[in-house]
Image: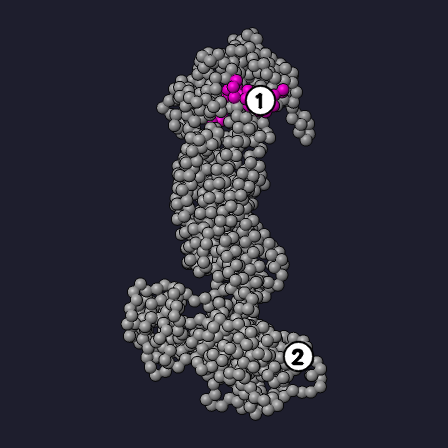
């Protein structure tokens, strides 16, 4: 066997040297190159997003508890050599020159934050630092404005500013610009003040019974060792009790998550699409290579090699080719990725690592696997033929579709493998399966549709003499080849349209999502008697609001008259909604969403948010019971509603129809936009309405906008890269059909066809292929986009007529232009030469 | 019908000039049959492609049916091939994607003849392949493929037919069938026949026999032939 292997390597070297493998190697390098490059970018964006979330969180893992956690938990983290920081959050009164203000005090350990930037303004400059030094307090803008403090150079040098907190006095050391690790999902309810944890005892503000949040931060000690942290997270998760929660990455930031999920889905789609394009490129090259090998294999059969030996040699050659080609592709992909990183500037630089293993593995495995399975589908056919048959090129000449798809098993293995790799690569099973199912079904449908159209073109072309006779005959004869080309071209085109449409729609949606004046403040606890005066206050101060919404606190107690813990599935019992009071609201328009067909007047109609309904296994017509105060309200679900959590409007899990719950005590919620320079108005608002609570979300909004801007830039780059990869594969696909065209046309020239006749025939064929490909591509892309928008991206769908026109033009230019350019060789060399070349 | 005057073909290689054909001269009348023999690599196929206008000479000229090929552009040469010339190749050169009938119909369709299918079927019957008309080249034996090629060559009713080693790829029996067919059709249609061959018997069957030696073409006399056959 070793002898045969050595022979295989010798053949490989010779074929590589002679250039027989050049084209194959090139397409493999392009395929794995684009796959790895996009894979690196996706990992990088993903890493960047997580890194960004960690910066928001202040660490990779955050544990929040309403009491001190057992010492064992922290010791365990220490044993695992995880970095730790601690924060205590509690409300307390601050006093400056006899003025009092309730603030959210954050006492942090000296090494806080583990990740992210704590920004503080001191003497006109913003510094990035760790916790305040002992004896110092840092205040946010609202407190600074309220207490009329100043941190410019002049004031710092003239007098010291003192702030009292409990029994202790602190020097006002700086203006807080940014604090990572915001509790309560980033929302700052009261103005914030930051002190060093070591000063906490001096203040004597925490007494038994005080309401304090204990927040513990954990991060990897060494970058890249995520497993230890993941293990610790699992360990902690099992020990969590009521009032304790874990947060990691972006998972808990609903508003951030909704936006980023779409970006992540897009990237997954881009990954799957690149993989599919790569598979097409490898399939084309493998098929051509396989055909070229028939004669060599026949000669070897005649020389006494067994079929087994030949298959071993071919497998060894393909493995070597696959490994070398994939490796070269990955290196190329990595280099292009580094260039792209440079081009993107600081957009994606905030991660710990440049290099990721996943894209390397996926590219290598995809390259070698697809190469082997697709090539084998061609090569195993030698078993069916005699050596003489092979020498006579019996397979070579046979191009019918039934022959091409002869070895179904290998093609099935390739297809199944491709789907498995796609799922692994994208990490998104639903998206991948939806994508392949839609594509497969529509491709089959549109293949037959294209066939029907082609028959009609030939029929009407002949009947009305629209196309010259010879071109028609040419089309008729090459019907099968034309259909195969239309199928592959339209597939490539449709993938590019698909990624273009999703990209455009996504960017457009994001831009529309946060227009100028998107609400960045929420006000809660507005009492019913204050409502009118509150609204008129906002109006007088030109603060725009989308209106006030009623809010009633109620706890879900029963589902279909069963206690919630019994009614919901076991895995949903820990759902947050079951352990806290929900905000119920009232609306007279339960219009949008999935509605119950049956309206029962005796029941109180309830609208429920889709994800909550799904988590708790609640469906239409289910009865829900809430406890509001000491009373119970029962209602029936008549609507399941999609909520846009990233809209920055007040959203509710549960909405009642009017006239039922208004009799219970309720407060009102509103959202509005306030620029950074108008922050002082918050203090005036608070002074006017002391009972209200203001939640500032500008930080989170800024973060989302930052991430979206950067991800948008990355998406643009990935799109351009996919288009380039698609164009290369398209030209490879077109040139793969050229050999047979050249041969046929050389024969027809010897029979006396003029250049003009041949050009016309080829042009008609290319125009028909281009038009059919464009038509099918547009239909395929529109259909797939519709399904993906509905199923995955939850975006509104509309037809894209501009894309149709553009596709026809692009298709004509590429297929006709490139096609005529490639076949031009037929006309520039003698027929004799063409025949000799084709025989070789 | 066919004139070759001072015909030469050479190739310039990086090291030297390679003369494939040197000063070839002959004249063939309509209806005559001509065989060109010679050792492998002596330039037989190149000469045939120059005579048929499939390639251009380095110097000299070829006249077919009164037309000087060097004075015609590619379009005119194509028209000449379409109307007056037929080909049979050693490797058959049938279009793989087309069946036997379609292959034979091709030259007729090029001319725009309306009854192309009938004519093609007649010719297939003439070469004994009416039962195989819907078979593709891969489904036919070598002899059958060459018979299709002959039917295709005669479909355009050529005035002159060039055959490049038409029996070179065939067994003896198939070869004999092909030779027989070529001469029969030649007789029926009054076609001038130019054959390149290694087969001395086939060459003998031609009225005139030329021998190509290192690019120089010489016509063999009856005595030469007798000597070459060892008689």
The color scheme shown is: one colour
Cα–Cα span, label 2 and label 1: 90 Å
Q: Dot 2 lies on which element?
A: strand
Q: Residue B195: give x, y in percent of width and height.
A: 52, 17
Residue count near mark 2 (Cα–Cα under 10 Å), binned few <14, some 14–19, many ≥20: some
Say which chain tag 2 marks.
Answer: A
Judging depth in this view, the residue of B86 and B178 nearest the camera is B86
Rendered view: A217 above or below A336: below
Q: Residue at x 55, y 60 (%)?
A: A712
Query: Where is residue A718 drawn, in percent x and y?
Result: 55, 55
**Residue B131 placement: quadrant:** top left
A721 to A592, vertically: above or below: above
- Identify residue for label 2: A122
Dividing the picture into quarters, in which one does residue A569 lie? bottom left
Disc 1, SS: helix
Seen as rendered, the residue at the extreme bottom is A167
- The percent coordinates of residue B117 (x first, y second) are 41, 23
Kindly identify which residue carries mark 1. B76
Residue positioned most to the top: B223
Any part of residue B130 in sight: yes
Crowd rating for badge 1 (residues with CA inside 10 Å; few <14, some 14–19, many 20+) = some
Q: Which residues are magenta?
A: B70-94
Q: Nearer the viewer, residue A208 or A36?
A: A208
Q: How many marks?
A: 2
B100 sits left or right of A762 in the view = left
């Amino acid at each position: 066997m070793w002898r045969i292997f050595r022979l295989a390597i010798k053949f490989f070297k010779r074929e590589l040297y002679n250039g027989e493998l050049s084209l194959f190697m090139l397409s493999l390098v392009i395929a794995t190159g684009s796959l790895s490059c996009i894979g690196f970018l996706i990992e990088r964006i993903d890493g960047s997003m997580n890194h960004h979330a960690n910066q928001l969180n202040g660490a990779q893992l955050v544990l929040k508890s309403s009491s001190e956690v057992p010492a064992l938990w922290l010791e365990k983290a220490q044993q695992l050599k995880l970095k730790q920081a601690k924060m205590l959050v509690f409300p307390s009164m601050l006093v400056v020159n006899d003025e009092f203000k309730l603030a959210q005090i954050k006492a942090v350990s000296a090494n806080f934050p583990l990740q992210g930037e704590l920004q503080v303004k001191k003497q006109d400059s913003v510094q990035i630092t760790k916790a305040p030094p002992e004896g110092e307090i840092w205040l946010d803008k609202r407190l600074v404005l309220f207490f009329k403090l100043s941190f410019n150079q002049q004031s710092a040098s003239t007098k010291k500013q003192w702030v009292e907190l409990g029994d202790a006095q602190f020097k006002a050391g700086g203006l807080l610009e940014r604090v990572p690790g915001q509790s309560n999902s980033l929302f700052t309810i009261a103005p914030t003040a930051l002190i060093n944890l070591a000063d906490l005892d001096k203040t004597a503000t925490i007494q038994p019974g005080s309401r304090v949040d204990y927040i513990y931060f954990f991060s990897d000690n060494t970058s890249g060792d995520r497993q230890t942290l993941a293990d610790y997270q699992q360990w902690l998760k099992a020990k969590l009790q009521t009032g304790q929660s874990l947060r990691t990455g972006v998972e808990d930031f609903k508003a951030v998550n909704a936006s980023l999920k779409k970006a992540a889905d897009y990237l997954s789609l881009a990954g799957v699409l690149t993989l599919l394009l790569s598979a097409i490129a490898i399939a084309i090259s493998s098929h051509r290579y396989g055909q070229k090998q028939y004669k060599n294999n026949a000669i070897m059969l005649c020389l006494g090699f067994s079929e087994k030996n030949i298959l071993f040699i071919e497998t060894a050659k393909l493995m070597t080719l696959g490994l070398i080609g994939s490796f070269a592709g990955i290196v190329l992909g990595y280099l292009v990725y580094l260039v792209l990183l440079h081009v993107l500037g600081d957009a994606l630089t905030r991660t710990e690592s440049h290099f990721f293993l996943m894209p390397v593995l996926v590219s290598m495995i995809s390259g070698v696997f697809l190469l082997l399975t697709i090539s084998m589908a061609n090569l195993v056919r030698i078993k069916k033929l005699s050596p003489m048959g092979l020498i006579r090129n019996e397979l070579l000449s046979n191009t019918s579709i039934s022959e091409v798809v002869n070895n179904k098993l290998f093609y099935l293995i390739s297809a199944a493998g491709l789907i498995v790799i796609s799922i692994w690569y994208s990490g998104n099973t639903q998206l991948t399966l939806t994508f392949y199912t839609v594509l497969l079904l529509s491709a089959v449908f549109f293949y037959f549709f294209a066939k029907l159209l082609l028959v009609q073109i030939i029929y009407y072309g002949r009947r009305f003499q629209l196309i010259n006779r010879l071109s028609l005959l040419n089309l008729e004869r090459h019907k099968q080849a034309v259909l195969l080309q239309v199928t592959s071209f339209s597939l490539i085109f449709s993938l590019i349209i698909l990624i273009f449409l999703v990209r455009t729609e996504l960017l457009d949606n994001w831009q529309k999502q946060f227009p100028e004046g998107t609400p960045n403040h929420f006000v809660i606890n507005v009492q019913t008697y204050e409502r009118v005066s509150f609204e008129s206050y906002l109006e007088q101060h030109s603060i725009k609001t989308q209106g006030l919404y009623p809010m009633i606190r109620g706890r879900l107690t029963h589902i279909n008259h069963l206690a919630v813990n019994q009614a919901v599935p076991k895995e949903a019992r820990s759902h947050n909604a079951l352990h806290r009071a929900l905000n119920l609201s009232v609306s007279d328009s339960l219009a949008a969403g999935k509605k119950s067909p049956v309206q029962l007047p005796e029941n109180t109609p309830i609208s429920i948010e889709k994800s909550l309904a799904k988590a708790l296994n609640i469906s239409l017509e289910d009865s829900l019971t809430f406890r509001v105060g000491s009373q119970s309200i029962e209602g029936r679900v008549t609507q399941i509603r999609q909520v846009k959590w990233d809209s920055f409007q007040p959203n509710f899990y549960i909405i009642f129809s009017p006239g039922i719950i208004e009799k219970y005590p309720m407060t009102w919620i509103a959202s509005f936009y306030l620029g950074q320079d108008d922050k002082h108005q918050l203090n005036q608002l608070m002074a006017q309405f002391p009972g209200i609570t203001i939640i500032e979300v500008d930080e989170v909004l800024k973060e989302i906008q930052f991430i979206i801007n950067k991800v948008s830039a990355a998406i643009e780059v990935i799109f351009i890269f996919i288009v380039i990869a698609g164009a290369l594969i398209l030209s490879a696909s077109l040139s793969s059909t050229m050999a047979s065209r050249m041969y046929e046309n050389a024969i027809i020239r010897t029979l006396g066809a003029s250049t003009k006749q041949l050009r016309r025939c080829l042009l008609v064929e290319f125009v028909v292929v281009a038009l059919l490909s464009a038509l099918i591509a547009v239909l395929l892309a529109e259909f797939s986009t519709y399904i993906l928008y509905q199923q995955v991206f939850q975006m509104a769908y509309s037809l894209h007529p501009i894309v149709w026109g553009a596709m026809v033009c692009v298709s004509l230019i590429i297929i006709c232009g490139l096609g005529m350019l490639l076949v031009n060789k037929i006309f520039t060399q003698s027929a004799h030469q063409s025949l000799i070349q084709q025989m070789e | 019908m066919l004139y070759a005057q001072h015909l030469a073909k050479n190739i310039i290689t990086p090291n030297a000039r390679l003369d494939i054909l040197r000063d070839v001269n002959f004249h063939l009348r309509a209806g005559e049959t001509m065989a060109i023999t010679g050792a492998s690599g002596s330039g037989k196929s190149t000469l045939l492609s120059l005579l048929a206008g499939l390639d251009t000479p380095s110097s000299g000229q070829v006249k077919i049916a009164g037309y000087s090929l060097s004075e015609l552009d590619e379009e005119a040469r194509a028209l000449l091939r379409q109307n007056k010339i037929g080909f049979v190749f050693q490797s058959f050169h049938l279009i793989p994607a087309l069946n036997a009938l379609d292959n034979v119909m091709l030259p007729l369709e090029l001319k725009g003849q309306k009854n192309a299918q009938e004519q093609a079927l007649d010719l297939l019957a003439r070469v004994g392949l009416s039962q195989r008309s819907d078979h593709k080249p891969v489904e036919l034996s070598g002899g059958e493929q060459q018979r299709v090629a002959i039917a295709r060559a005669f479909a355009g009713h050529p005035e002159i037919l060039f055959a490049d080693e038409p029996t070179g790829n065939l067994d003896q029996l198939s070869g004999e069938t092909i030779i027989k067919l070529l001469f029969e059709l030649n007789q029926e249609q009054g076609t001038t026949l130019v054959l390149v061959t290694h087969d001395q018997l086939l060459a003998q069957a031609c009225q005139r026999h030329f021998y190509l030696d290192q690019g120089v073409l010489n016509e063999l006399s009856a005595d030469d032939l007798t000597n070459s056959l060892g008689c």
